[in-house]
Image (cartoon, rainbow, N blue to C red):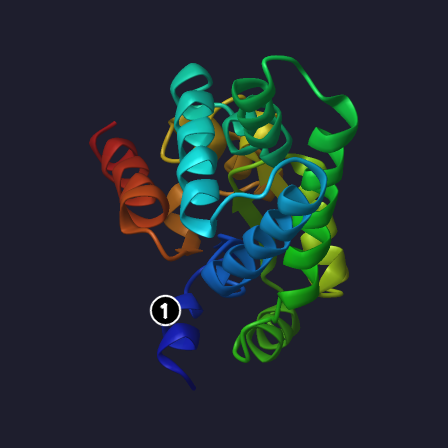
Amino acid sequence: MTALDQKAKSKKVIFLDLDNTLYAYKPCHRYALNQAYSAYRKHVEKISWRTFLAFYEKARFRTHRRLRGQAASHSRLLYFQNMLETRLGRTDFKKSLLLEKIYWQAFFSRMKLAPWVRPFLKRMKAEGKRIVVVTDLTTELQMKKLLRFRLEKSIDAIVTSEEAGAEKPDPKIFKLAFQKARCLARQALLIGDDSQKDIYPLLEFIKVLSVV
């Protein structure tokens, strides 16, 4: 029995983060952004990689500042749209959509499920535990990632920040997860890469329920 199995032994539900938990996010993002850069040089303007990154990060920052706490704040389409509007002085519909398409195609092509995930889920399902993915970002995109990994039969439900109207660690997303899982906070184990977003919120729920 692994350490993770031991932690899950007394629980009825397993809450799973998705990005950077079920797979490594950064290598996928770096490759996808590089492919978007190649397309940008071909269809928009020939600039250096460093300049492209600076433009991208500024567009990302502006989008996050405007849409803080919303799933749309992670939209690559909005990043590229904002980036092109800043550079061209107008909205370029085709190029915005093209850059987003190239980014996600490249991203998905590099996604690799972490080795521990499939065996762990198989053991948890055999023990009758419910598996719920609790994740930021949009529902369509996160569903596509799970389908890419062929995990749809191992997952009982998904809760996204788009659906909940708030991002982790906001209580709204966890309350919805508890409703879908039909469980109490103390009955769930949350597995994720960010203690501030994934672990502490669950502990706070348990603490509040214990006081009440």
Q: Which amino acid type is marked by label 1?
A: Lys
Residue at 70% in and 64% down: 109
SS class of the residue under badge 1?
helix
- Where, quadrant-wise, is the N terminus in this rendering? bottom left
127 in relation to 130, above or below = below
- For this view, does 25 lie left or right of residue 78? left
The spot of residue 151 in percent (x, y) is 71, 63
Q: Which residue is mark 1?
A: 7
The percent position of residue 170, horizontal first and vertical second, equals 38, 28
Quarter of the image with the C terminus is: top left
Give the x, y percent position of residue 2: 40, 83
On the question of residue 93 being in view, the answer is yes
Is 65 placed left or right of 113 in the picture? left
Left or right of 199 in this view: 185 = right
The outermost residue toward the bottom is 1
- Left or right side of 198 for 178: right
Of 97 and 180, nearer the camera is 97
Residue drawn at x 53%, y 55% is 29
Query: Taking the image as drawn, is residue 156 in sight?
Result: no
In this picture, is 110 found above or below 25? below
Tell me the crowding category of disc 1: few under 14, some 14 to 19, or many 20 or more residues within 10 angstroms, Cα based. Answer: few
